[in-house]
Image (spheres, rainbow, N blue to C red):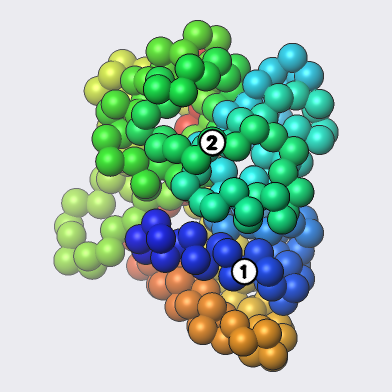
């Protein structure tokens, strides 16, 4: 999906009460979310990433900023979100952080000094992963938590090693730059999230339709159905990459 299409989708869904109800049921939090984070993953971000009031969290591709808002409000830390969405979307969802309309491939241009960098399903938008991870790694005292799903869309591909946690596209960029990382496998979580999403969607179909958002309902349903098929055929995997210097 092109960035402008994604922005339009978020613009419409952040005005949808049907989607907010859907998010609460699927993700476990009554906030607008546009990623593959189930409640267990969100709870990990909110409870297992070491954050204090002294930290500055940088959220790459923050979307409407829902998870960054939760972190800032919980810890009283500083938050910075980077994305290319219209700022009005973030104002509407209760922004509690600094927002930069910018490019995740140009981190060093913004003179930022994060102590924690979070990327949730935004790495796909990078045009140069090597450059991006090098820039992030060059930031002093910056710990990174990168959520990434790897898919194989061509069933004819015989070599599926790219689904290995140390062979995905982001792992390759980290390895090439000698950046040590740890991983947590969230593949099962993503597969279950697709299944739960489809069940919840069917429950709220009428409400989406009444809002004039039936096309968005069908779009989400198509994406989730594709996701389940990929997992059924062992063509998908999801990991959290942790770069914390420890």
Q: x, y (%) of residue 227?
A: 44, 67
Looking at the image, residue 80 sits to the left or right of residue 77; the answer is left
Q: Is residue 60 above or below residue 49?
A: below
Return the disc, 1 or 2, that comes first in the chain's sequence: 1
Q: Quadrant of the N terminus?
A: bottom left
Q: Residue at x 28, y 28 (%)?
A: 130
Q: Which is more toward the observer, 112 or 28?
A: 112
Taking the spot 40% from the left edge, 22% from the top edge, the residue there is 109
Callout 2: few (<14), some (14-19), or many (20+) C-alpha neighbours within 10 Å? some
Cβ atoms at labels 1 and 2 below 8 Å apart: no
* Spot occupied by residue 30 in the image (x, y as percentages of width and height): 78, 59
Residue 43 position, x and y percent, is 73, 43
Secondary structure of the residue carrying numbered label 1: helix
Q: Which mark is residue 164?
A: none
The C terminus: image quadrant = top right
Q: Which residue is mark 1?
A: 13
Task: Find numbered disc 2 in the image and state the secondary structure of the residue it sits on.
Answer: strand
Residue lying farthest top?
Answer: 140
Give the image quarter of residue 200: bottom right
Q: Percent x, y for residue 76?
A: 81, 26
Q: Give the residue displayed 28% in from the left and 41% down from the top.
A: 127
Pointer 2 residue = 100
| Residue 18, placed above or below residue 50 | below
Task: Kindly tell me whether residue 153 is visible in this rendering.
Answer: yes
For label 1, the crowd category at 10 Å Cα-Cα, with few meaning under 14, some 14 to 19 and many 20 or more, is: many
Where 217 falls versus 191 (above or below)? Answer: below
Please state if 61 lies on the left or on the right of 129 as rendered: right
């Amino acid at each position: 999906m092109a960035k402008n299409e994604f922005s339009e989708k978020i613009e419409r869904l952040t005005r949808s009460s049907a989607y907010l109800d859907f998010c609460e049921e699927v993700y476990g939090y009554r906030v607008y979310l546009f990623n593959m984070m189930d409640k267990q993953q969100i709870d990990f971000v909110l409870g297992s990433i070491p954050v204090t009031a002294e930290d500055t969290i940088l959220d790459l591709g923050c979307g409407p900023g829902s998870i960054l808002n939760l972190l800032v409000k919980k810890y009283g830390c500083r938050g910075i979100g980077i994305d290319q969405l219209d700022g009005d979307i973030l104002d509407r969802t209760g922004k509690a952080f600094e927002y930069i309309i910018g490019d995740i491939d140009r981190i060093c241009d913004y003179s930022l000094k994060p102590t924690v960098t979070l990327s949730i399903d935004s790495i796909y938008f990078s045009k140069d992963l090597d450059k991006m991870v090098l820039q992030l790694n060059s930031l002093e005292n910056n710990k990174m938590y990168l959520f990434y799903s790897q898919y194989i869309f061509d069933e004819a591909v015989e070599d599926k090693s790219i689904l290995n946690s140390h062979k995905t596209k982001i792992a390759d960029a980290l390895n090439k730059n000698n950046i040590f990382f740890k991983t947590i496998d969230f593949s099962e979580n993503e597969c279950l999230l697709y299944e739960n999403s489809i069940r919840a969607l069917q429950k709220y179909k009428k409400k989406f339709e009444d809002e004039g958002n039936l096309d968005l309902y069908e779009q989400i349903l198509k994406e989730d159905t594709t996701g389940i098929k990929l997992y059924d055929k062992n063509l998908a995997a999801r990991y959290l990459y942790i770069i914390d210097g420890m």
